[in-house]
Amino acid sequence: MNIVHLKYAVEVEKTRSISKAAENLFMGQPNLSRAIRELEESLGITIFERTSRGISVTPQGEEFLQYAKKIIAQIDAVEAMYKNGRTDKQVFSVSVPRASYIACAFTEFAKTIDPQKQAEIFYKETNSMRAINNILQADYRLGIIRYQTTFEQYFQALLLEKGLASEVLLEFSYVALMSKDHPLASRGDFELEELRDYVEIAHADPYVPSLPLIDVKKAELSEFVDKRIFVFERGSQMDLLANVPNTFMWVSPVPDRLLALYGLVQKQCSANTRRYKDVLVYKRGYRFTELDRRFVEEVRRFRPQNIIPYRTRKTPFR
């Protein structure tokens, strides 16, 4: 097996065609077919299935190609670094929950990126399991996961099993976010039953592998509401809340500047006793870069001020 063969296999997967891949690689189709066959024989696996519809990737092939792409990316990075002298590229990646205070922190962090240097910055909003998998499988440096404290034992065991270090950033209860024109906006405390007549905005992908999805939804969603709009990103939720006054959403506390921007209010409800944690995760032994430290500092700065954060870390970031 050699690096050239890895690049051949990745190109075949991208085009799903031997002839098209050969054209892109400026080589003959028979030579490419022979190279792929030699690669498969040296590995003892079948990477591609040849069908009447073209090329498909086998399960073993998918696993191999994930490694191949990482190897090629690392080689390209080394070549770019040393071919014309070392480049000081700014690299940062994080997966986070859909939390407004974290989004505001990322905006402030982005202001510190040096425009005179190359930069590759990845910020992905997703659920906790995908955030963990992004660190383990997709080379993301950091993640922030959110879970209900009911599931804490499961997540702590999972992080230990996967070799991930963690730090609790915030423990909180959700607040009800709604338009300033919502019927409950001018009220003080309210009962959960009073939400029965309104439409709840909810994120559509809660995920705890130890439980069936239906059980996770029961643990996350209010039993008093039977009208919901499910969304996957914060832009839609903010627009809905601002423009449909009979909607509401359970969220982590929102910075004042976003409340003013969208004309929203957040209401604490003493009857909502569920507790959540936002937890910073990363590979055990990982050494934080300057960009990592800057981002985490901004997250700490934007944490809701009326909630006392956990301070469990005993040593400074490395």
Image (cartoon, rainbow, N blue to C red):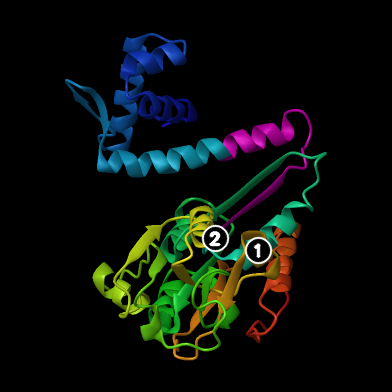
Q: Is residue 49 left or right of residue 115?
A: left
Quadrant housing residue 268: bottom right
The image position of residue 18, as x and y in percent, is 32, 18
Q: Name the residue under label 2.
A: 242
The image position of residue 159, as x and y in percent, is 46, 73
Quadrant housing residue 30: top left
Quadrant housing residue 191: bottom left
Residue at (80, 41) in percent of width and height? 115
Vertical placement of residue 113 versus 275, above or below: above
The image position of residue 195, as x and y in percent, is 39, 78
Q: Examine the structure image and report whether residue 82 is included in the region drawn in magenta.
A: yes
Q: Between 163 and 263, which is closer to the camera in this rendering?
A: 263
Residue at (69, 63) in percent of width and height? 105
Whole-number angstrom distance, CA of label 2 to CA of label 1: 11 Å
Vertical placement of residue 18 versus 204, above or below: above
For the N terminus, the quadrant is top left
Residue 283 shows in this picture: no
Kind of residue sitting beneath label 2? Ala
Q: How many marks?
A: 2
Vertical placement of residue 21 versus 310, above or below: above
Residue at (41, 57) in percent of width and height? 231
For the C terminus, the quadrant is bottom right
The image position of residue 263, as x and y in percent, is 62, 64
**What are the residue bounds of the magenta stretch?**
74-95
User: In the drawing, what numbered circle is on residue 258?
Assistant: 1
